[in-house]
Each structure stands twice: as structure tokens, then as C-alpha cells.
Amino acid sequence: MRIGVLTGGGDCPGLNAVIRAVVRKGAGIYGHEFVGFRDGWRGPLEGTTMPLGIPDVRGILPRGGTILGSSRTNPFKEERGVERVTENLHRLGVDALVAIGGEDTLGVATKLAERGVHVVGVPKTIDNDLNATDYTFGFDTAVNIAMEAIDRLHTTAESHHRALIVEVMGRHAGWIALHAGMASGANVILIPEQPFSVERVCAYVESRFQAHYAPIIVVAEGATPSGSGEAVLEKGLDAFGHARLGGIGEWLAAEIEKNTGKEARTTVLGHIQRGGTPTAFDRMLATRFGLHAIDAASENDWGKMVALRGTDIVRVPLADATTELKLVKPELYAEAEVFFG
Ligand code: F6P
């Protein structure tokens, strides 16, 4: 079989580990041929490819990013998008696709699978908000990067008696904020699932100063104050209609200064959370996803996504992965709240 591989959406540590595992087992054990599609769905849409044989995946296991490139291209938003994808697959002699991506990339894969394209999905996002899998690779790396940053901010916050706010990624789900905040002893964690009261946050800040510690507030980019969306600076929409977020950290710092009289500063971690080498956990998970994805393709088990359930890798219908997001449950957030203030 000739199989195309693509990586779409925001990049994420571990993408190269998946590509390597797919090609090593696919070419080495099953005897498939591979073609790399450039920049997510833009590759099949425009017919842009790169060679993807065993020599091309040597040495990429620890490398961040994706050797294939990525984009947020949505063929369903392009003129004759779906026809162009299927024509290019036919022209290039590609029998099947392994699509590695998050909610949007796999949403396209789901719709193409419904139209008869042979596709297997691999879940990816640092946000960890994809349903049907316990974890996505890239999340553990992002959490460790954020945790290390917060550990460092603790010491400078203490020295200057400042409130420090750390804005992390997570537009719909607060998994990174929750895990990094709990792992680093943050004093307040604010997530999109739980609109927050500014008064309450200021009270936590004051009580922390009274205890002679400087507060650290971890806020997910998609968190909002109760009763208002005004803290979110929308910087346009991407091809899937998602707002580009940013600004909640700065907004909150101004509110804290105004209400408590204490100096407050914000650090926005941004794309640092997605860059660089994956952790051992992410390398292992990404590698196992790649191995199981190529097994599914070799068994002609189309329209499926590989997923982690406990310690097992299973196959689930692609549609199950993309119908709803996996959000932080109130009970789990309540565990973190024990340490607030
Ligand atoms: O979906 C992953 C993610 O990193 C989100 O956490 C974040 O909101 C978004 O991508 C940022 O995307 P971009 O790099 O395109 O601005």
C-alpha cells in the first residue's frame, strides 16, 4: 500500500515520534511505501509532498515540531477542497492516509472518511482536550515546561513581593493550567470551564501576602471572569473559526493591582509550551500511537483513531474523538481548590 502521512493544527512535541514509528513499522514490517504531505491538509489539497522513507525518519525521535510542517488549512473551507484532495490522492497513487492532529484535523479526517477516503487518525494536542483518549502526547511536555517556569517564578515573586500571573495555553479546557498549577503549588488556578470571580482571586492574593508568601496565579488563556467575556482579546479567527486568544493575564494583573494595591506582573508562556524535545512519556505514547495506527491501516480498519485507555492503546471511531471536547470536571477542580489562597 502507498500511504500518505500528514500533521495538522498546532504543532506539538512527539509528532516526529509518531511519524517515525508509522514509517519504521509500516515500511520495515509491512512493506508499505510512504509519502509525506506538507503542512497538514494543505499537502493533499495542493499536492505538495516530500519523501518519507526509513532514511528520512532517522534521528527524529527527540526532535520537537514536525518534519512534515503543519497548518490549520481546512479543505472544507476551500473552493472544490474535497474534490482537490481526492484528485491529488488519486494522481499521487496514495491509497490511504494517516492523519495526525487534534479536534480540527481529525474533524476533517472524519468527514473525508464518511466520503470513502481511507484514513486512520492519531490524536495530538498539547491541550489534552480530545475526547476518547485518556491522554494526548505533547500534553506532558507542555505541563513540564509550564511547571518549570512556575517553579522559577516562585523565587522571583518572593524576592519582590509581587503577585505573578502565568498565562498558559488552553482555550476550551484547563488541563495544562490545572496540572502545571497543582504540580508547582500555584495559589490560584483559573480555567475556562469555571468562570472566576475577580473579588475572590484578589482575596486569595491578599491572604497569600498576609502569610508572607508571594502569590502565583496560573490562568488558562480561555479563562473568563464570571458574567463577562471582556478579558479576552480576540486576535481574529483561524480557518476552523477559533478565536486567537490572549490578554487574560494582563487584564487580571491590572485588576489585582487596582483592587489590592500590590504590584502584579504577567508572564505569557505562549508557544514555548509547544516547542522543543518531548518528555519520555510523550515519546513513548507517540511511538505507541504510531505503531498501532499503522497496524489499523494494514488491517484496512478505516475511519478509526488510536486512543489511550488506561495503559492500553485501542481503536475508536474517528467520529467519537471529535464530537465533544474532554473538559476538566468540577470534582477535579475542587481538588486543586484545596490549595488556593
Ligand atoms: O491547539 C493547541 C494550541 O496550542 C492551543 O492551546 C492554542 O490556543 C492554540 O494552539 C494556538 O494556536 P496558534 O499557534 O495557531 O496561535
Image (cartoon, rainbow, N blue to C red):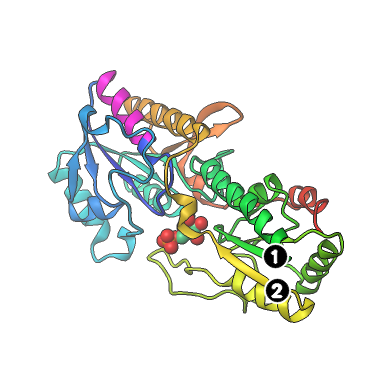
Asked if the beta carbon under badge 2 is closer than 8 A to the nearest atom of ligand 1, the reply is: no
Where is residue 118 drawn, in percent x and y? 31, 39
Q: Is residue 181 left or right of residue 341?
A: left
Q: In this view, does 63 lie to the left or right of 285?
A: left
Closer to the chain start, of discs 2 and 1, is 1
Between 113 and 74, the residue placed more toward the observer is 74
Q: Does 130 sit above or below residue 285?
A: below
Q: Write the residue at 50% across / 48% down.
A: 126
Q: In this view, does 245 lie to the left or right of 47?
A: right
| Boundaries of the magenta span | 17-30
The residue carrying pointer 1 sits among few (fewer than 14), some (14 to 19) or many (20 or more) residues within 10 Å by Cα, namely few
The residue carrying pointer 2 sits among few (fewer than 14), some (14 to 19) or many (20 or more) residues within 10 Å by Cα, namely some
Q: Does 81 sit above or below residue 109?
A: below
Q: Can you identify the residue that label 1 sits on?
A: 160
- At label 1, the amino acid type is His
Q: Quadrant of residue 28?
A: top left
* Circles 2 and 1 in contact, beta carbons < 8 Å: yes
